[in-house]
Image: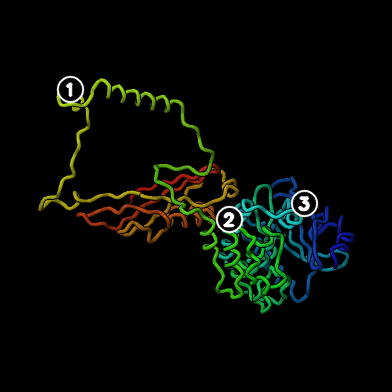
Amino acid sequence: MASAEARRVWEGRVVAGKFPLREWLGGTEHGAVFLTERKQPSSPATQKAAIKLIAADAGNAERQLSRWRAAAQLSHPHLIRIFEADRCQLNGSPLLYAVMEYADEDLSQILPQRPLTPEEVADLLPPSLEALSYLHGKGFVHGGIKPSNILAVGEQIKLSADQVTSLGEMHSRPRRDVYDPPEKEAGIVSPAGDLWSLGITLLAVLTQKTPSSAEEAQVPGLLEKMPEPFRGIARECLHLDPKRRCSIAQIEARLAPAARSVPVQPQLALPGPQRSMNKGMITVAVAVVALLIGLVVFYPRGENTPGRESTSEQTAPVTKASTPQPGEPLKQAVSQGEVLHQVLPDIPQSAMDTITGTIKINVLVEVDSSGKVTAAKFVTRGPSEYFAERVLKAVQGWEFSPPEVAGQPAPSAWVIYFRLRRASIQASAEKSR
């Protein structure tokens, strides 16, 4: 049914006796999307939602329904939630429906007016990549990355979920547009296909143009108007050979600053507004400086200066490290080691805003004699797999000065403690052995 006809015939109807079709939001020849509402669990209140309706094709209906129901089991802060999927009938026509999280707008509504700025694309990419990485890690591919499927829900960027497909599933659908990877003609669906779609999407949002074919996407001058690093990312996404396309990790590396590590402090809180220096601390600092100046004025250097001996007596004694003598236990020659660099998990504020209270994640890391992390496992994983995966990725970048035994660097083990709150991330480490 054409979208215009669906709007005229279906608007105002009720699906499955509980989802009223309030307003037509859009559609294609393959289906229509309406504004609806759903009752929230354990509450009489209703929630705004979107409902997608497509024809129940006899040869594909059960497979499509299974895809939607599998996608409904996924949970990620940058993925549109599917609440329910089932069969229904309207005007005697058998249909499939999926009730989804309502989005305020999508990128395709912005592009006719203007391209995105590089700063907007820099904000857009990380949450999109995180959602894709989550899907690929769960054994799914998105299968439909394009501006109309990148949506805004409040302040959050989210990918649609109704196209999600199991990894390796063969498709009989033909390639619809240039956003679909070339290999889709052969029915092949893979994570590399999502990267092709992402490359075309980058070109579209930055230039408001797309190539007419996969072959035109290879024209050297096509990407020249795109700023770096997006030009390089798009170039590596748009190889005709799926095996040559870049990975999500490589894209993230191109987007990351030159160094994500931060100098070690006992506790580090990010993100959040930088706090102005406490006035009391300023006063103390000024007093200390004044005292030092006073010492210089009243106690100048010189061998015969009165009071020098008294000043020396107030200086803390320097203790030399003892050298183990033959027969002494070896433990006296052990240096404990310390943290050199710590890396905080790279979590966007939109995901941090979903945290209630404090998420505690503790990781035990094995460190080799050069100070590099060689293995990591959870001591306390926390309630969220998403945040746990971000933390586990971050600990791989920690660096330590190795402990020394008899003057030789030795392997060690550390427990790294992460405390995630809505406004901050704190990290500290304790030597385990």
Alpha carbon separation for disc pair 1 and 2? 65 Å
Q: From the top left corner, tell me how far across and down residue 251 is, in percent.
A: 55, 61
Q: Which of the two residues, 322 or 171, is positioned nearer the viewer here?
A: 322
Where is mark 3, residue-wise?
37
Give the camera-side residue of 104 and 8: 104
The picture places residue 420, in percent across and down from the top left corner, at 50, 46
| Label 3 SS | strand
Tell me the residue at 76%/53% (across/down): 113
Above or below, comparing residue 418 to residue 85 in the picture:
above
Disc 1 or disc 2, which is closer to the eye?
A: 1
**Which numbered disc, 1 or 2, marks the residue that appears first in the sequence?**
2
Residue located beneath label 1 in the image? 305
Which residue: 63% across, 63% down?
224
Q: Amino acid at mark 3?
A: Glu
- Residue 410 x %, y %: 27, 57
Judge from the rendering whether residue 425 lies leftward or rightward of residue 109; answer left or right: left
